[in-house]
Amino acid sequence: MLTNKVVVCRAEKGWTQQELAELVDVSRQTIASIEKNKYNPSLILAFKISSVFGKSIIDVFDYKQT
């Protein structure tokens, strides 16, 4: 199971879902789905998201085996 802290990281920056989406070149709906754990981003997208926050991927995303 992949969980994330995208909402928290986004709030720290004061960004809207739309602003983050534009920074990583996806739709706002994609960001909303990621935040709700309804969509697992590709590895490339996960790295892009982490990078715009200035954090490592493990600081933003967490994988636990079920």
Image (cartoon, rainbow, N blue to C red):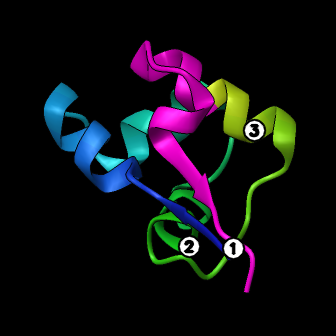
Q: Which of marks 1 and 3 is nearer the N terminus?
A: 1
Position of residue 57 measured from the top left corner of the image (x, y, whole percent) = 60, 31
* Mark 2: few/some/many CA within 10 Å (<14, 14-19, 20+): few
Foreground residue among 32 and 58: 58
Tag 1 residue? 39
Instruction: Please tell me which residue is depicted at 51% across the width and 56% down the height of the picture.
Output: 28
- Residue extending furthest top? 54
Name of the residue lying farthest toward the bottom: 66
For badge 2, the amino acid type reads: Ser
Image quadrant where one finds the N terminus: bottom right
> Mark 3 = which residue?
45
Where is 65 relative to 18, above or below? below
Camera-nearest residue between 47 and 25: 47
| x, y percent for residue 48 | 67, 26
Q: Looking at the image, do the residues carrying marks 1 and 2 touch, with CB atoms under 8 Å apart?
A: yes
Q: Earlier in the sequence, mark 1 or mark 2?
A: 2
Which three-letter amino acid code belongs to the residue tagged 1? Answer: Tyr
